[in-house]
Image (cartoon, grey):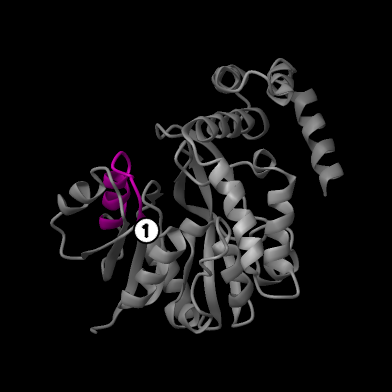
Amino acid sequence: MNKIPVTVLMPAYNTEQYIGDAIRSVLNQTFTDFELLIVNDGSTDKTEEVITSFKDPRIVLINQPNGGVSAALNTGLGQARGEYIARFDADDICYPDRLQLQYSFMKENPDYVVIGSDADYMDKNGEYLYLYRNIGHTNEEINERITTYCPFIHSSVFYIKEFALQTGGYDERAHTFEDWLLWKKFIKKGKVCNFRQPLISVRLNPESVTVDEKLRGKRFVELKRAMLFGSSDITAEQEKELLAILKSQNFSGFKHFSYHILVAKKYLWNNYQPAKARQHLKEAISLKPFLPGTYGLLLLSYIPKTILGNFYNLYKTARN
C-alpha cells in the first residue's frame, strides 16, 4: 500500500442531496496531496451515482452493506493510505484551507495526536445558523472537560491513523457516541486541541443523527454516560437497551420533529431570529401537537432578546 500524507475519510448513507457539495469542498482544498476515501454504507438512493460522477483520481470508493457509521469508519481506517485521517461527513462543507492548516500544525507539533476546530452550523438548505464554540481549545481544557461534553466536532477532527488503529478504532457498540469514546483513548496518547477558527460548516438535517438528547429521553442519557464512563466495558445488555431506544425513534416523524426543535432553539439561543424560530416550532407542533415543551418554546420566541438571553444564562448556570 503506497502511503500518502492524508486520507479524508467520509462515510456515506443516503446522502444524494448533499454529498456532491461535500465532495467538491474537499477537492477544492488548497492542500492537494490526499485521498478522499468514501465508504458507501449500503445507500439505497443515488449516493453512489453522485460519487462516481466525479472523475478525480483522488476519490476512492468502497461499497459495503449497511452496518452503521462506526462499521463504515472502521472499514475506512483499515483501507486508508494516509498517515493522518481527516474525518468528514457527507453532508458538511470543508473550508478551502482546512487540510493545509491541520496538516501543517500536526507536522510542526508532533506531540499532538488529534486536533479539531470550531464550526459554523447551517440548516438543511445551507442557510447559516450559528458559530459553535467547542467546550475546550487547549490540551488542558479538553482533558479537564472531556467527561462533561464531547470535546470535538467529529467532522472537523484530524488525527494520527496509527493511534486510532492501536486503540481498536471506533467501538461499534457505542451507537451515536463512538467518537467521544475514541477521544477518551486518544488523550492518553498525546496532546489534543481545537482551532478557534471554524474550518468546516456542519449541516443539520432531518436524517442526521444530531438530535437534542433531551428528546431521546432520560434513560438514553443514563445509558450513554454509563457506557462512556462506567468502570467496565460496554455490556451486551446496555447495547441492546440503547439500540431499542434508538430504533423506537428511527422514523421520519421523530427525525423531522427533532430537526425543527433543534433549529428553533438555535434561532432563539444562538442567533436570535424569533420569526424563524416560530416557523420551525409550528412545523414541530404539526408533527407532535401534544408536547407542552414545544408550546413553551413558542412562548419564549415572543420574549425580547435581552430578557431571553438572561433567562438562557440562568438556565445554563443551573444545568452546570
Q: Residue at x 26, y 45 (%)?
A: 20
| Residue 13 falls inside the magenta stretch | yes
- Residue where numbered disc 1 is placed: 11
Q: Quadrant of residue 77?
A: bottom left
Q: Which residue is depicted at the point 79% across and 42% down?
A: 316
Instruction: Tell me which corner region of the image, top left, top right, bottom left or bottom right, holds residue 56.
Output: bottom left
Which residue is nearer to you in this view: 94 or 284? Answer: 284
* Count of number-bearing discs: 1
Corner quadrant of residue 127: top left
Say above or below: 176 vs 211.
below
Task: Residue at 57%, 63% (x, y): give it.
Answer: 174
In the image, 179 versus 41, the foreground residue is: 41
Kindly identify the residue that appears in the image at 40 percent across and 31 percent down. Answer: 125
Q: Is residue 128 above or below residue 52?
A: above
How many C-alpha atoms fall within 10 Å of the one at disc 1: few (<14), some, or many (≥20)? many
Q: Is residue 156 magenta?
A: no
x then y, percent, for residue 88 = 40, 58
**How far across and how far down the image is residue 175, in percent?**
55, 58
Question: Hey, what amino acid is under mark 1?
Answer: Pro
Left or right: where 278 falls relative to 60:
right
The magenta stretch spans which residues? Answer: 12-27
Residue 98 seen anywhere in this rendered image of the structure = yes
Determine the secondary structure under disc 1: strand
Residue 137 appears in the picture as rendered: no
Task: Using the image, determine if residue 230 lies above or below residue 11.
Answer: below
Q: Is residue 313 left or right of residue 118?
A: right
> In the rendering, at what x and y percent does residue 207 appear?
44, 40
